[in-house]
Image (tube, rainbow, N blue to C red):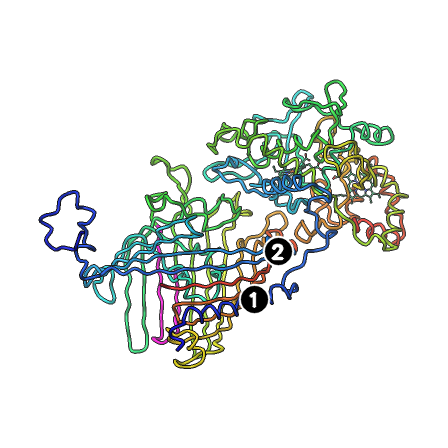
Amino acid sequence: MITAQTDTGSLTNQDAIYDRPFIINFEKARTAIGGYLEANTNYFVEDGVTEGFSMEMRRFNIFIFSPINRRINFISELEFEHGTEEIALEMALIDVRVSDGLNLRGGIILPQIGLVNANHDSPKWNFVERPLSSTHIIPTTLSEVGFGIHGKFFSDSRILSYDAYVVNGLQESIILNEEGRTFLQQGKSEEMFEEDNNGVPMMNVKFSLSNRKSTEVGVSYYGGIYNTYRIEGAKVEDPRSMHLTAIDFTTESKKIQLKGEVTYLMIDVPSNLVEIYGEQQYGGFIEVSYTLFEEKEGSILSALTPYTTIPSINLDLRVERVDFNLGTFKSTQTAIRDEINSITGGLSIRPDAANTVFRFNYTYQFIIDNLGNPAVRNAGIQMGFATYF
Amino acid sequence: MPKNYPARMNKKLMVLLLICSGIILFSCKKLFPPEPPGNEVLAAPMEGLTKAQLASHAAGDELFAKIYTQSEGLGPIFIQSSCEGCHVGDGKGHPFTMVTRFARLTQGTIDYMEDLGGPQVQNRALSGYVPEGVHESADFVSQRLAPLLTGLGFLAAVHDSTIINMALKMGKVNWVEPPDYFVPTADHISVAGRFVGRFGKKAKEIRIFDQVVFALKEDIGITSDFDLEDPFNHLVGNNTGDNVADPEVGKDVINNLVFYLRTLKAPERRNIDDPDVIAGEKLFADLGCINCHKPTLKTAKSDIAVLSEVEFHPFTDLLIHDMGDDLDDGFPEGSATGSEWRTPPLWGLGLAKDVQGGERYLLHDGSASTIDEVLKVHGGEAMSASAAFFSLSEEDHDKVITFLNSL
């Protein structure tokens, strides 16, 4: 049996797989493993037509965390989506702490854009689906190779935090993609983790101000040149850039929790394509959770869930909208629509405060095409749970 | 005590939740949007297809909606990236997807200017590539909006002889030269190597198949087994640029699309018992509209049982007619001249605005938004019908409109 050892003198090349710090320093047990699991059921009807009922094993994510020393932390997140259909290393980074106000970060990072991208763990949310503005405009989950700095400044009543990173950035297929519309999600590619498509990194910056209790407001930016404008060094077209901005907030009183985000994209698109691939799009959501029921330890409800800190039952409501193209048709001077309006009501049960959530959602969506024809109506019921482990 | 049974208690909660949601799911059908009535939607398969036929229809439906990307061969120059992009909901097009064709006369004969970007403009391009415009030396420009595609299988199943017979009274068959790959069947009738055209605004294409091959290339920039060259871009001097091996789609894709189009239902009518609709229909006949907009046609034998030897009501004769100066774009196709257009089927007319973004864009180029505007330019062979229409009393006029909206 191999035991952890500090005397490495007797190890040969053959022992390399065990000659690793996390084993050698086993007794310090510094690496922590965690994660979350998320599953749900779907039943949707679109204009009277349904595919029926189905179950979805959405995500199984594993976190590995290691405080390497007093100043250096390592954290990573490995995601398994839909079983093993999609496996992605969503995050793998080190943070080097210089001071509260200055930390260096590098690796595969989650850019700080809007509310959800860097705070996307399902158990934190009371709804089965992520907000549309965070998936259809902001391409959550966006992970990027990059590096930069982040930090916090404190005053008696406020905390100002900032993030600033350079990343390889999204790629050309933001347009001319299989969505047939400007869609940042389509700008992702495996290649982003290897090299930049144009040799000019994108930037990500976020500032947030919090009142030290539960109210926080953030302003964020992500953008830069997205097209592959040079091939083998030769400039084959003009560089084109995209600018994504977002404002988000969260606030909470005793019974009510409020969250929201507005995001706006501006992007250079060749003029012959702008009617199909919009140059401006926006989205936003607002979400209210009202705590119906919150129990103290030893009460009836907490008896159901004995490990609990504070079980609670919440009524949830989300209203949201995305508009994929804010342009107008040249020929008719009418507005290009291409939008989704959606409302979701729900019930969430948190038997274990922040760790586990059971969710029950009812969603009604109006999907309007670019011409503004009568909306396709889509409604559905979802049930699911998400839990950290 | 409960500390020993955490798992069971949690399960109870789950079961409760499941039951609650089960009740809501099955008791409240109202929570879900109902299917709109069949006579208010255009895009749907026809009744009476077998399961296997429905499966083929669904496969074709997917291809019809498919958005092509650069890596699948889109372009390098194109107008839209999918069929559905122009034929929204299988319906009529919108001016933003207008198709423009051009040609010139060279020593008295028509020249479609293939080495100068003809016959059709591709006004969009992959990034880093250049879109086309109408070449400055063009003499004629023809602008067209996508037509309605529903019920196409019925139109395709009409026998050539039926079309030829209708032309004995009024209108003309567009006798066209077939594409190189065309292999006639026993049902095709030809005269001096030319065949009966029936699809397209001037009935330039013989079969749905030919229209699809043409659309893939000239509208989307997709090469197929039947046309291996990407659209030629004279501004760049080549017909490559998407860097995808040709053919970009095989015969199966075309066949699937054709099957899909053949099995789209015919548009269904609304308010047929309304006395104004009934009166309007009679006026429509009396005015002579039905000389061209034939209410009833019959299909020949077909391999699809529901299309075989049945009557249907498209309000077209599939013939080309001289429509006079206002509709003359000078652009000939086959034996159709600039002023000759195929009678468009009028079925689905009442639903047009639900696929054209709330407005109506009528005529080949969408230049009319009302029936009156349409009939103002019905000249040539339609002159007398048009004149009769404008001499109707206001009441009768409105009845004709009400009837047309019921289609």
Asked whether residue B149 appears in the rendered view, the answer is no
| Three-letter amino acid code of the residue under disc 2 | Glu
| Three-letter amino acid code of the residue under disc 1 | Ser
Residue linked to disc 2? A46
Where's residue B16, x and y in %?
52, 70
Task: Examine the rendered structure and indicate whether residue A96 appears above or below residue B3.
Answer: above
Q: Residue lying farthest top?
A: B192
Task: Examine the rendered structure and indicate whether residue B197 appears above or below residue A353.
Answer: above
Residue linked to disc 1? B21
Number of other residues with Cα within 10 Å of mark 2, as a class: few under 14, some 14 to 19, many 20 or more:
some
Where's residue A1, x and y in %?
18, 51
Where's residue A169, x and y in %?
37, 49
Q: Nearer the viewer, mark 1 or mark 2?
A: 1
Number of other residues with Cα within 10 Å of mark 1, as a class: few under 14, some 14 to 19, many 20 or more:
some
Q: Are marks 1 and 2 in contact (CB under 8 Å)?
A: no
The residue closer to the viewer here, A270 or A90, is A90
In the rendered structure, which segment of residues is drawn in magenta?
A202-220
Asked whether residue A116 appears in the rendered view, the answer is yes
Q: Main SS of the magenta segment? A: strand
Where's residue A76, x and y in %?
31, 56
Q: Residue at x 65, y 22 (%)?
A: B106
Instruction: Tell me the quadrant of the picture where the C terminus of chain A can be found.
Output: bottom left
The residue closer to the viewer here, A81 or A117, is A81
Identify the chain of the residue marked 1, using the numbered disc in the image. Answer: B
Q: Secondary structure at mark 2?
A: strand
